[in-house]
Image (spheres, rainbow, N blue to C red):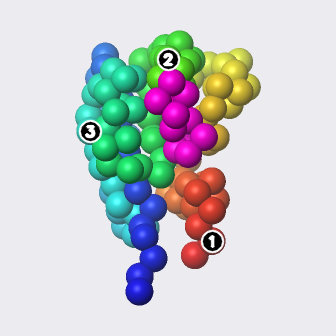
């Protein structure tokens, strides 16, 4: 009997205009054997609803245009309201001010990836927060 694959839902916030990075990450995760659902640009409530419907283990967000902390707080508020904040793992990649890193982690992002993160760092990071040691 095969083990269930790690399921990662990837999205960008509504006004995000850069997609190359998240599409590359989707390919990296698929090549690593994860199931990836890419839903494009969405509001925080749509991201959480999609993650619930998809039974995602991880939500990966890209943020290149700013607002990561404000939108991240909204995302976490909705996840908490829907009762999934403690079940789903949250990851943020992109460009965000270094002074916001501690706050981003404190609100619930377990991993933060900046430009230049390697494929191995991304894959192993996600496996480690989900608890997959394969």
Kindly tell me whether residue 92 is visible in this rendering.
no
Q: Nearer the viewer, residue 116 or 132?
A: 132
x and y, in percent, of residue 63 in the image? 45, 26
The answer for how far apart the CA atoms under marks 1 and 3 are is 27 Å
Residue segment shown in magenta: 79-94
Q: Residues within 10 Å of mark 1 (few under 14, many from 20)?
A: few
**Residue name at image x 52 percent, y 34 percent:** 83
Q: Nearer the viewer, mark 3 or mark 2?
A: 2
Question: Which comes before the other along the chain, label 1 or label 3?
Answer: 3
Corner quadrant of residue 18: top left
Which residue, given by chain and number where applicable, does mark 3 sit on?
39
Q: Determine the image quadrant of residue 35.
A: bottom left
- Tell whether 130 sits left or right of 46: right
Q: Position of residue 24 (x, y in %)?
A: 35, 49
- Please tell me the numbered disc located at residue 74: 2
What residue is drawn where x is 55% and y is 45%?
A: 87
**Image quadrant in which you'd find residue 64:** top left
Q: How many marks?
A: 3
- Distance from disc 3 to disc 2, alpha carbons, whole Å, reads 18 Å
**Secondary structure of the residue carrying numbered label 2:** helix
Whether 1 is among the magenta residues is: no
Q: Quadrant of the N terminus?
A: bottom left
Above or below — where is 117 with respect to 76?
Answer: below
- Residue at image point 51% right, 38% down: 84
**Sooner in the amino-acid sequence: mark 2 or mark 1:** 2
Q: Which residue is mark 1?
A: 133
């Amino acid at each position: 009997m095969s083990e269930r694959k790690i399921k990662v839902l990837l999205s960008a916030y509504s006004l995000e205009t850069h997609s190359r990075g998240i599409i590359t990450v989707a390919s990296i995760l698929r090549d690593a054997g994860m199931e990836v659902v890419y839903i494009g640009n969405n509001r925080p409530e749509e991201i959480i609803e999609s993650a619930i419907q998809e039974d995602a283990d991880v939500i990966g967000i890209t943020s290149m245009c700013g607002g990561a902390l404000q939108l991240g707080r909204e995302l976490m508020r909705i996840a908490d309201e829907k009762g999934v904040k403690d079940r789903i793992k949250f990851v943020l990649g992109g460009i965000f001010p270094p002074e916001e890193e501690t706050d981003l982690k404190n609100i619930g992002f377990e991993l933060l990836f900046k430009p230049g993160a390697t494929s191995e760092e991304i894959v192993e990071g996600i496996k480690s927060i989900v608890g997959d040691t394969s």
